[in-house]
Image (cartoon, grey):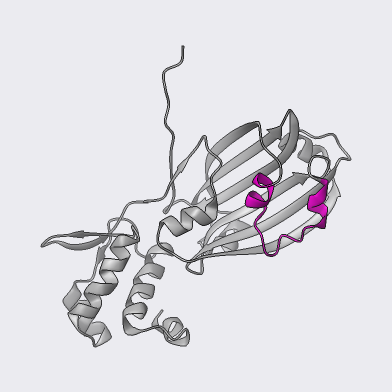
Amino acid sequence: MTDIAEAEGLSLYGRIFADIRDAILSGAWPPGHRIPFESELAERYKCSRMTVNKALSQLSRAGLIERRRRSGSFVKQPSLQSAVLEIHDIKAEVQALGLDYRYSRTARRERQANESDRRRLDVPAGAPLLELECRHYAADWPFCMEERLISLTAVPEAAEESFEGVAPGPYLTGRIPWSAAEHTIRAVGADRGVAAGLRLAAGAPCLTIERRTWSAGVPVTQVRLTYPGNIHSLVARFTPSG
């Protein structure tokens, strides 16, 4: 990992931060894993304990580790929480962790809806669709895979957008108001495509959120978001019915 940091021209403090961050985000250091003591890291990196302490403090502020007095530092349980009943911005999720965000569109195709699309997006067969595949990154590590269908009947101007520089979520919420949304949440094992896209082992646990949205009763979009299961949790707040 330090070779990558050196290639990016990071300071020694930045190298320590990047190495530990990458070990956590990759799953190599799971929740509860004890981080090497400051003295061990100082010896490993041939630096002062002050430099190590600075890196660990930044990791703690980013919500990635927990520092316990006289016990050391440990990888935190997933600190990212999504409100299930809200439509949230992935960029904001990543930045809330104190990490740099990057987005990449990996596929784009215009086509007509088939039978499977009718179940996914509630549109008639033959309706014009835009199909997108995207990746969202936290500090250059895959954070989330996005697979999306957009109804070009509801949002015809999307046919003119490449989605190379803007993610489809913010694009849609900024152009067409949604009036209803439906969420389906599943725990799944990473198939070959997901494993490659998220840099996971095949079969690794993942969390998927599938969402459909409508505007005034007209289907707008269906999206499947897939997260590595070890870094994401879901929270919803309820009030009593009736």
The picture quadrant where one finds residue 67 is bottom left
For the view shown, which residue lies furthest in the right direction?
126
Residue 149's place in the image compared with 137, above or below, is above
Q: Position of residue 149 (x, y in %)?
A: 73, 46
Q: Is residue 94 above or below residue 43?
A: above
Quarter occupied by residue 76: bottom left
Closest to the observer, 145 or 218: 218
Q: Residue at x 62, y 53 (%)?
A: 146
Q: Nearer the viewer, residue 106 or 204?
A: 106
Q: Position of residue 226 (x, y in %)?
A: 56, 50
Q: Is residue 86 visible?
A: yes
Image height of 84 relative to 172, above or below: above
> What residue do we see at 66% from left, 37% from top?
212
Magenta segment: 156-174
**Residue under the point 42% across and 53% down:** 230
Residue 122 coordinates in the image, percent (x, y): 76, 33
The answer to whether 205 appears left or right of 160 in the picture is left
- Give the left or right position of residue 86, taking residue 65 as reference: right
